[in-house]
Every structure is written in structure tokens, then in C-alpha cells.
Image: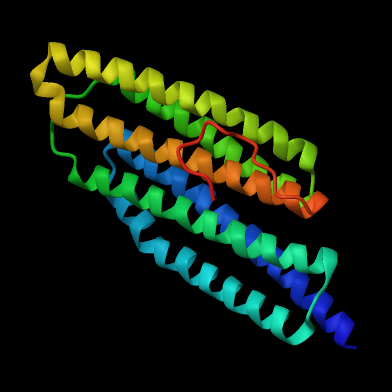
Amino acid sequence: MLRTQFEEDLLNLHNQFYEMGMMVSSAVHKSVRSYIDHDKKLAQEVIDHDVEINDMEVRLEKKSFEMIALQQPVTTDLRTIITIMKASSDLERMGDHAVSVAKSTIRLKGLPRILEVEKEINEMSNYVKKMVDNVLIAYVKTDQKDARMIAKMDERVNDYFQKIYDMTTNTMEKESDTIISGTDYLHVAGYLERVGDYVTNICEWIVYLATGKITELNSNRNENF
């Protein structure tokens, strides 16, 4: 009886984690959409919904600790719970970065824009969203091969960041009236780059789930767990 209750709890934990991941993916997507379209209403929606993402992380963590204390799971089950706890904390931070992008949207005043940079930011965000969605599928399948491939995708996120950085700073030097909006572009690209780093963290947790080993997948990141 206990075992089946435990399995049910574990399945619920899985499902909640996946649901949280979908909410974060949507938040990242909407925040950049709001930024590019100057849609303050959509940006506010992202900010308002962040409390749900935070609540989910707290619930997941609480339930995880409870299951560890009461059921004393071993091996794979314990790894699963640890993975969900750690990866949900990465998701929560991604949500925070989506909020930061949304707040940039709300700050936007009718300043001169650099449209080719916005096009790159849009592409970068679509690419990052694809990484987030793919990592959730890799998690559901405990597919470490996919996880390793998704972590490799982060190199392209860094390339996007570099390209946006170069284009923006060049324009800012030539046209001083773009300095304020340009600084914002750099922030937004930086937030997206961090989301890519957190996706890589989750890839590492998937490898841990599959193998029991903590493996660093991208050594060139700004910050590891």
C-alpha cells in the first residue's frame, strides 16, 4: 500500500514539475513577445503569473522533503526526487528572468529603437524557448542523449548574445540617442542567455537522473550550480 502511495506521489511530482516547466516556457515566450511588441499588458500578465511559478516551486520542494523524510527512498527514486527539487529551482530562476524582461517592457518609453537588434533578440528567444521545451521532453523520457545535445545548443545562445552585444554597442557609439534602449537590449539578451544556462543545468540533472553521476556539460558558462 505504502509503495503504491509513494509511486502516486512520485507521479504527481513529475506531472507538477512538467506543468511548472510549461508555465516557465510560456512566461519566457510572452515576456519577449511583450518586449518586441511594446505590449505592456502582456508584460504585466507575465509579472502577475510569476507568483504561481514561485508557489509551484515551494510546493514541489515541500513535497520532495516530505517524501524523503517519510518514505526514505533509495537509488533511482531518491535521484528522481533530488532531480525534481534541483531542476524546479532552475525553472523558478528562469521565470525570474522572464519577469525581468517583462519589467524592461514596462519601462520602455518611446525611445529610438534598433530594429535589426530586435530581430536578433526575437530569434534568440525563439531558440531559447525551443531549448526549454526540448529539455522538458528529455526530462519526461529521462533521455540523457537528448539532454547532452540540448546542452550543446547553449553555445548558439552565447553566439546570439555576442552578436547582439556587438551590433548594439556599435550602434550606441554611432547614435547616442540609442544608448538607453541599447542598454535595455543588452539586459534582455543577458536574461535570455541566463535562461540558456539554466536549461543546461537541467540537462545536467537529467544526466544525473539517468546515470547517478553529476556531470558538467558546458564548462564555458558564467555560473554553474
Write down the quadrant of residue 44 in the picture: bottom left
* Residue at 70% in and 84% down: 69
Which percent across, then down, holds residue 153?
61, 29
Residue 137 in view, yes or no: yes
Which quadrant holds the N terminus? Answer: bottom right
Q: In the image, is 32 to the left or to the right of 91?
A: left
Which percent across, then down, holds residue 178?
15, 23
Query: Along the line of sight, which residue is nearer the eye, 148 or 109?
Result: 148
Report the number of numbered marks. Answer: 0
The image shows residue 63, relative to residue 16, as above or below, that is below
Which percent across, then down, holds residue 48?
35, 62
Residue 37 in view, yes or no: no
* Residue at 81% in and 68% down: 77
Which percent across, then down, holds residue 123?
46, 25
The image shows residue 82, relative to residue 104, as above or below, that is below
Q: Which scheme is used to colour this image of the protein?
A: rainbow
Q: In the image, is 121 to the left or to the right of 69?
A: left
* Residue at 65% in and 58% down: 18
* Residue at 14% in and 11% down: 174
Q: In the image, is 7 to the left or to the right of 206?
A: right
